[in-house]
Image (tube, rainbow, N blue to C red):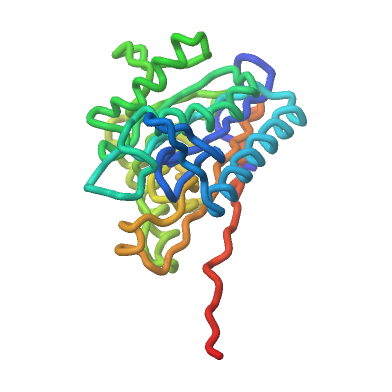
Amino acid sequence: MRKQGNGHGNSTPILIAHVSDLHAGGTTALSPPRIRLDDGGEYVAHKTQVWLWERWGDFWRHAAIRRKVLGARLYIVFNGDLVEGDHHGTTQIMSGNPNAQAAALNAAMEAPLALEPDKLFIVRGTAAHAGKSGSAEERIADGLRRDKRPVIGDRDTGAASWWHLYLACHGVRIDIAHHGRTGLREHTRGSQAVLHAHDILLSYIKRQEDPPHLCLRGHHHKFNDSTDACPVRVVTGGAWQFATEHIHKIATDSVSDIGGLLVAIQPDSTYTVEKVHYQPERGKLWRSA
């Protein structure tokens, strides 16, 4: 547990549920059991997607329990790449029709929205997935806002979604963006988080601004944590997608970290970060006769 800043405001704890990289609509990503397609057929989730779907439900049940135990307000952050999009000539999408991908995401949203969160934040991800200027995620956020969900948008631009989100919760300053840094090598991954933390710290100091205590990132489909190596802590969350063709090419030895983050912030400015990590098995071993 780390203590930062000075407590202020409401005496109720805050629980931030942070998820990123759902990639809904991808054939290796989060999907409900069935999606109806435009021409009357169906996309049926395969065994790996069923596994992901079950863990997705478990994550939100776990978040609900933590919220109840803490007696906390629930803030949910969807940190980019919510849909897979239609990019780079990929064949690994359930349909090129964006309505099918929207249907998959709508089904995925049912579990977190059923918790009736106190605040919702949507951060824009990668153009290849979410469209130029994060257009898909802006549509998603604006749709939720029109549906009277508690979406907090960017007050400077009036947009419903964010490129870069800055929060202050009970004196804890939090910096959230989709893109972070990581290493492809297992033994150097942690050092990248530490380097990133120091770069963020220096960037704020050079501008004579108060640096964040905690930075949350996504994009790399790997948990990573600078821990206490720097006054700024950088934590990268997992994903809800297994390897695509692209990942098999650039990181063939890597297995995606599946899961999300739960950040519990107390009124006295202490906070904890829980990595809810679901570990899949590698492929089965083939043995010769």
| Residue located at (64% from left, 35% from top) | 60
**In front: 61, or 205?**
61
Q: Position of residue 39 (x, y in %)?
A: 37, 31
| Quadrant showing the C terminus | bottom right
71, above or below 245, in the image: above
Q: Position of residue 37 (x, y in %)?
A: 41, 33
261, above or below 15, in the image: below
| Residue located at (52% from left, 51% from top) | 46
Q: How many marks?
A: 0
| Residue located at (53% from left, 32% from top) | 108
Say if residue 67 shows up in the picture: yes
| Residue located at (53% from left, 67% from top) | 282
Describe residue 154's horizontal placement relative to residue 78 as left or right. Answer: left
**In front: 12, or 114?**
114
Describe residue 68's horizontal placement relative to residue 280 as left or right. Answer: right
Q: Residue furthest front?
A: 40
112, above or below 42, in the image: above
**In front: 257, or 101?**
101
**Which quadrant holds residue 271?**
top right
Q: Residue furthest bottom?
A: 289
Say if residue 236 shows up in the picture: no
Q: Residue furthest right?
A: 69
| Quadrant showing the N terminus | top right
Q: Position of residue 147 (x, y in %)?
A: 49, 10
